[in-house]
Image (spheres, helix red, strand yellow):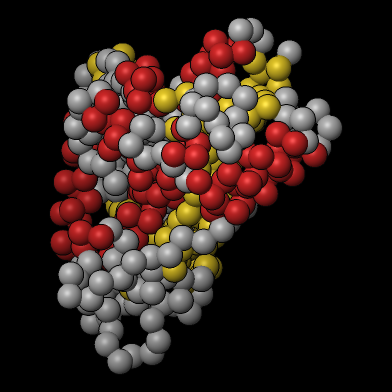
Amino acid sequence: MTRVMIFIDGSWLYRSLPQLALACSKDGYVIDYGKLPGTLGDELGKRLGRTDADIVRTHLFGSYPSNYDEQDEPVARGTADFFNLLREEFHYEVDLFAVDFGGNRIRPRDRDPDHPFEPKEKCVDVALATSLVYYATVPHAYDVAIVVIGDRDYTPALQQVRRLGKRVAVASIRGCCARELSDPVDRERVKDVDIIWLNDLAEVLELRYESVLRECQSPHHQGDRRVPTTYRPRKNRPFYCNDCRRVFSEQRRAAEMLLTVVPETGGGEDPQGGEVSGKVDKLLLDNGYGFVRAEDGRQYFFHRTDVQNDDWPKLAIGDPISFVIRHWPANNKAGRCSDVRRVGSDTQGRVDDESAPGYPDPSARP
Ligand SMILES: [Zn+2]
């Protein structure tokens, strides 16, 4: 058995995906991270002339935004959700490092061109290199490391791992790979087998949306619950059909119009985002809205998708709960709150809603 560990520079891979899209001549190309470890293992097997590769672990190193413009909350949530998907669905070991956006927008296209700002990524490459060398010194941790990288900064770490008697395979993307890594003569002595080009595997690695019949779990679903869909819900998350999702978001929009509150100006400090205790005060079951009363007597509303752990159907008036204040109450209207949690219920998991897709939607790339 050949024990294999995979080390992925997630930031580099994400930046380099457009090159894979080119290889497939496809706009909106999305890589299937579930297929990546196995496909790399197969390619390694071809190069080693044996098929007993045992992928013992897949490490991905990446970064997440911090201190960003608050409008970008959904973008940041999408990023966090993606990394959770890698952990939950595919058992990746994900190591993340904060990138300080200094209050700026996350996406370059949303930033003011007159005030250029370039976020600085920290630690990702050093963390990968350290981990690679560390496991090389742990007896029997791995025999072969597959590194999914493109930068020449990794050269010393790859050389060191090889001096420790471990083999190295480099997987990279043509057009995004340093010459030192791709050199067929390997003057830098960084690898033991021919480079694995992901461009050649782009078709195999593409995330495909196959249509299957799934059961809609919305209590308001009309007709046959089994509907054809290409949507893949996340593990342990409910599936709602498109019709139910549409009704859901229309109700949400309508109710939010009714309940929109203007945050108090000059009246006390902004909500700090900490957890607050209270009790369920009122439930509008048809609209999917609820109200809570905090211990200080102030009232806040929330949508069913703000309730954690799928606990919305279990909520009853008077239940003790915790929540996070989004807007203070003002002008005799309730404030807005989210992250509603029944006190004493499991804290794992989050309710799916139409803005938190299970898999990346190819029509809405981050
Ligand atoms: Zn439905």
Q: Residue furthest right?
A: 139
Number of numbered markers: 0
Residue located 27% across and 79% down the image: 263
Kindly tell me whether residue 127 is visible in this rendering: yes
Report the side of 145 relative to 85 (left or right): right
Q: Position of residue 149 (x, y in %)?
A: 49, 39
Q: Quadrant of residue 172?
A: top left
Position above or below: 87 against 193? below
Which one is nearer the viewer's eye here, 19 or 356?
Answer: 19
Q: Position of residue 116 (x, y in %)?
A: 25, 72
Residue located 37% across and 40% down the image: 176
Q: Quadrant of the N terminus?
A: top right
Q: Residue furthest top?
A: 50
Q: Residue furthest bottom?
A: 266
Which one is nearer the viewer's eye here, 116 or 332?
Answer: 116
Which one is nearer the viewer's eye here, 15 or 305?
Answer: 15
Report the side of 79 relative to 212 (left or right): right
Q: Quadrant of residue 134?
A: top right
Position above or below: 144 against 365? above
Q: Position of residue 163 (x, y in %)?
A: 75, 36
Residue located 71% across and 22% down the image: 3
